[in-house]
């Protein structure tokens, strides 16, 4: 009876609560809740915007709206829900789970939802849409006592602009990206700043997250502390939400037109020689293309026996031949592994071995009868692949804060790997028994970028350093370098057992080192002018099957040599490789927009496309470009590598023009020029550094006097990736990536007066970003650009920003956004491979394509052009 009475009382209380007038209920509830209070529901915090939560009863896929699977959510997990689409429940960030028997979905009561609204009100008590801020206004509208630039401390450490909290690592936990890829392990006891959150993930910046679980503890500062940071940092006015917004702009049903491949090249980028079981000798050559291909050249006849596409790869430079004669090839950008059997003439794709790793490229491999060992970029990892089971057995990090693991050698007898790491250089001895590592590189070589190539012969480890032309011999017994010498070839040969010699090249001559006597020998065997050996391998030819000969590629045109050490004779040969379509890279238009220009990735080539005649003419002799600009009737291009600025005159037909070198900046450690503009007969360029301990430089080139000045480390430890003349100033944006490292502070938005370039002014961004990209002048006269996944406009007069966030995180190091103003007055852009349209008045946007689009330009009829892989596409506006 007592239980029944309690039950009835509960029903009465529930009915009385639900029948209260809504206004009275909300007002009464808010009286007991302070702004900033945490509202708990069912044992966890209820967040603003949250409408429920799911408990995972059985493993179920996390998907996006296109139905693509991102990862598997494990049984027992619990996730907040913020939206729903049909039978899909939204976890935030564009990710969903299906509402079926594999999950349990529950929703909070109305009073809990109202309590969150009360707690999330601003400290002034005003509704959020009525809260107005000025450029110096903090959350509580009071900056009294806070000085500009003052450091605000919270719980013993500095509170940074944009920071929303801190995590303390209680147990070792992985650092991951939104797609679940693991970057590294965060150690117990470490502390990290938190800048955002996505569902159950806490963002530490630059697109990396930790799971919010029992392995960490998360703390948040008070609203007063956050307000103080805003005052101290003089945050600009932000008129739009910084959350990822939904596309609402309608897009017409027009479809892009595939114009097709535009740049074709015969570019032989790497090679390895080997033999089949019948004694036939082959030169295995990588042809750059989309996809890249393997050409098998019979060295005895100089004929191509076959060309085999390496599907899923756009390049490959890591090759190794096992004792069984099989060739192994590692590809880029997906990290696929391939093997070629010369006896059966078959190629096998073993798939991506870098899955779930923060890598895009396998830099080097070494093989034995059981395993393939490889090293990677940009995660600087080492992996072990089992040839028998066709499975990767491990992938492990080498050293913290390194991006390259460049070369590898195997000591099979003692079960050690020797691994080169950079930048800057380090050399590891890796114990395969327990995966422990020991650094062995002497201090005098640690200013190098990395050990580019190495080979282990007997007790000696031969190492070639980069970027210097030094090479050394490290004695594993005495644990020290015993010799140093000059070399320019890409690597070393194996030991010639018939002569006890190892071979390499320097200044275009083949040199030998005798491993028995320790004597160097100049063979006087000369390679073609201005070439060095790109590969060096020992094989035997049919006309003298008992004699080892040295074979190697020397250029990107299919030229190779055959050197006979006994006769001291050298022969130069060349095979005719079929041209391959290559991935497209830089895309831009002529000033009158009557010509479209498109450059080839890596192997170069610059094609001029006529949109009216629909014809393409290719100019060869142009390497990969990072930027281009027209001034005074001439084209200026910025070529990679060595950060070369060149001029192309207009006197000759397009395919006969010869670029003239103006400036080369590699002596200052620079490698790329991502930003190039002109102002009053001056060219201004921004660079990405690769071989310097400094950041990128600003170049001021006078077109009248042909003189130039450089301003080194212009933004400390960052690269300059975009520039824009506007209102008598030049505005710029940076990337935190430089020298294979990341600057700890966010990317910078800046400007300078061209009369005084060294006097730069930093403009505070409304968020912490890794890149500020593609600055343009919008149709409203304001400055538009992209900062990571956010599109912004900036008013230099009022110093106000307007923003629209399209993506929570993006990839890349030099920028992957391109904006322009269409003939219809809308802003069009590509970002993270998406193609979008935006209304500059309202910042409403819609996606034309959700993938498969990079770069952007237009012709004089308003048609838009973008690239993807080897193809050029046209999107008609009319």
Image (cartoon, rainbow, N blue to C red):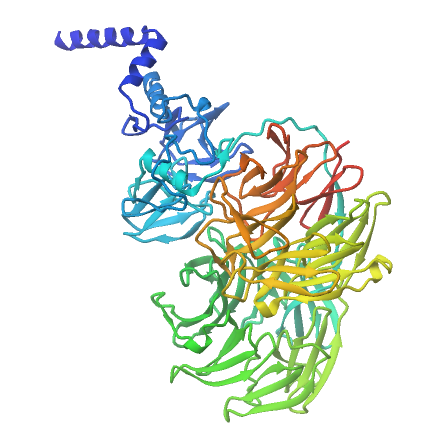
Q: Position of residue 640 (x, y in %)?
A: 65, 62
Q: Is residue 328 visible?
A: no
* Residue 47, quarter of picture: top left
Rendering quarter of residue 843: top right
> Residue 711 versus residue 627: which sits nearer the camera?
711
Q: Is residue 849 left or right of residue 228?
A: right
Vertical relation: 20 (above or below) 444: above
| Residue at left offset 60%, top offset 65% | 317
- How many numbered discs? 0
Is 601 or 771 nearer to us in this picture?
771
411 versus 239 height, above or below: below
Q: Position of residue 462 (x, y in %)?
A: 50, 79
Q: Is residue 591 visible?
A: yes
Say whether residue 839 is left or right of residue 53: right
Q: Which residue is drawn at the image coordinates 59% and 46% (left, top)?
A: 773
Nearer to the camera, 851 or 877? 877
Q: Where is residue 850 drawn, in percent x and y?
A: 61, 37
Between 431 and 684, which is closer to the camera in this rendering? 684
Q: Pick the quarter of the image with the N terminus.
A: top left
For the C terminus, the image quarter is top right
Where residue 673 appears, as percent x and y from the top left, is 63, 58
Q: Residue furthest left?
A: 2
């Amino acid at each position: 009876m007592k239980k029944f009475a309690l039950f009835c009382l509960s029903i009465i209380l529930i009915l009385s609560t639900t029948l209260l007038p809504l206004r009275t209920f909300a007002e009464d509830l808010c009286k007991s809740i302070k702004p900033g209070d945490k509202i708990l529901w069912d044992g966890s915090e209820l967040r603003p915007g949250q409408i429920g939560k799911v408990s995972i009863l059985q493993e179920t896929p996390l998907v996006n709206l296109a139905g693509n699977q991102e990862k598997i959510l494990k049984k027992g997990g619990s996730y907040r829900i913020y939206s729903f689409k049909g039978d899909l429940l939204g976890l935030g960030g564009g990710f969903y789970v299906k509402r079926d028997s594999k999950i349990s979905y529950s929703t909070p009561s109305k009073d809990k939802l109202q309590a969150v609204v009360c707690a999330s009100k601003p400290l002034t008590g005003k509704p959020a849409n009525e809260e107005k801020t000025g450029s110096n206004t903090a959350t509580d509208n009071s900056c009294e006592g806070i000085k500009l630039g003052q450091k605000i401390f919270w719980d013993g450490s500095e509170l940074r602009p944009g920071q929303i909290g801190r995590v303390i690592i209680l147990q070792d936990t992985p650092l991951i990206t939104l797609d679940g890829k693991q970057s590294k392990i965060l150690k117990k006891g470490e502390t990290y700043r938190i800048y955002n959150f996505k569902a159950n993930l806490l963002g530490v910046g630059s697109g990396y997250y930790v799971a919010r679980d029992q392995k960490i503890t998360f703390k948040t500062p008070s609203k007063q502390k956050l307000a103080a940071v805003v005052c101290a940092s003089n945050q600009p006015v932000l008129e739009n939400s910084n959350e990822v917004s939904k596309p609402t702009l309608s897009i017409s049903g027009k479809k892009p037109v595939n114009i097709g491949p535009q740049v074709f090249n015969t570019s032989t980028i790497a090679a390895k020689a080997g033999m089949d079981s019948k004694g036939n000798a082959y030169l295995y050559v990588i042809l750059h293309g989309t996809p890249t291909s393997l050409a098998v050249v019979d060295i005895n006849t100089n004929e191509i026996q076959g060309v085999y596409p390496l599907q899923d790869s756009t390049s490959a430079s890591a090759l190794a031949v096992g004792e069984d004669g099989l060739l192994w090839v590692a590809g880029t950008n997906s990290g696929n592994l391939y093997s070629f059997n010369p006896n059966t003439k078959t190629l096998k794709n073993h798939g991506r071995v870098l899955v779930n790793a923060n890598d895009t490229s396998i830099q080097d491999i070494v093989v034995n009868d059981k395993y393939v060992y490889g090293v990677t970029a940009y995660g600087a990892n080492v992996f072990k692949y089992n040839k028998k089971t066709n499975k990767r057995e491990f992938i492990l990090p080498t050293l913290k804060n390194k991006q390259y693991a460049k070369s590898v050698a195997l000591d099979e007898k003692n079960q050690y790997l020797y691994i080169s790491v950079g930048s800057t250089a380090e050399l590891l001895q890796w114990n395969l028994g327990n995966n422990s590592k020991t650094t062995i590189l002497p201090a005098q070589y640690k200013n190098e970028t990395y050990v580019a190539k190495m080979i282990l012969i007997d007790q000696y480890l031969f190492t070639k350093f980069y970027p210097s032309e030094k090479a050394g011999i490290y004695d594993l017994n005495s644990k020290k370098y015993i010799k140093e010498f000059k070399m320019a070839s890409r690597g070393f040969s194996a030991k010639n057992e018939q002569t006890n010699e190892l071979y390499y090249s320097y200044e275009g001559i083949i040199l030998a080192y005798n491993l028995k006597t320790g004597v160097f020998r100049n063979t006087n065997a000369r390679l073609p002018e201005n070439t060095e050996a790109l590969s060096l391998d020992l094989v035997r030819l049919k006309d003298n099957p008992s004699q080892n000969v040295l074979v190697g590629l020397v250029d990107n045109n299919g030229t190779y040599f055959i050197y006979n050490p006994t006769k001291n004779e050298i022969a130069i040969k060349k095979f005719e490789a079929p041209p391959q379509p290559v991935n497209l890279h830089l895309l831009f238009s002529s000033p009158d927009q009557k010509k479209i220009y498109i450059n080839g990735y890596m192997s170069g080539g610059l094609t001029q496309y006529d949109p009216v005649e629909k014809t393409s003419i290719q100019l060869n002799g142009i390497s990969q470009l990072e930027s281009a600009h027209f001034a005074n009737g001439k084209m200026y291009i910025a070529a990679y590598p060595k950060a070369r600025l060149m001029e192309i005159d207009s006197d000759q037909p397009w395919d006969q023009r010869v670029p003239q070198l103006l400036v080369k900046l590699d002596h200052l450690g620079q490698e790329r020029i991502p930003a190039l503009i002109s102002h009053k007969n001056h060219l201004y360029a921004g660079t990405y550094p690769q071989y310097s301990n400094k950041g990128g430089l600003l170049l001021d080139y006078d077109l009248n006097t042909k003189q130039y000045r450089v301003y080194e480390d212009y933004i400390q430890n960052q690269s300059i990736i975009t520039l824009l003349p506007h209102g008598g100033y030049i505005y710029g944006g940076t990337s935190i990536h430089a020298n294979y490292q990341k600057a700890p502070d966010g990317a910078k938005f800046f400007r300078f007066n061209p009369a005084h370039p060294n006097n730069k002014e930093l403009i505070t961004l409304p968020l912490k970003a890794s890149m500020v990209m593609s600055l343009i002048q919008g149709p409203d006269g304001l400055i538009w650009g992209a900062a990571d996944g956010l599109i912004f406009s900036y008013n230099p007069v009022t110093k106000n920003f307007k923003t629209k966030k399209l993506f929570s995180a993006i990839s890349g190091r030099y920028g992957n956004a391109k904006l322009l103003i269409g003939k219809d007055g809308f802003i069009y852009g590509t970002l993270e491979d998406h193609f979008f349209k935006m209304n500059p008045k309202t910042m409403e946007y819609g996606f034309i394509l959700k993938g498969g689009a990079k770069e952007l330009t237009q012709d004089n009829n308003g048609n838009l052009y973008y690239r993807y892989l080897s193809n050029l596409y046209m999107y008609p506006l009319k």
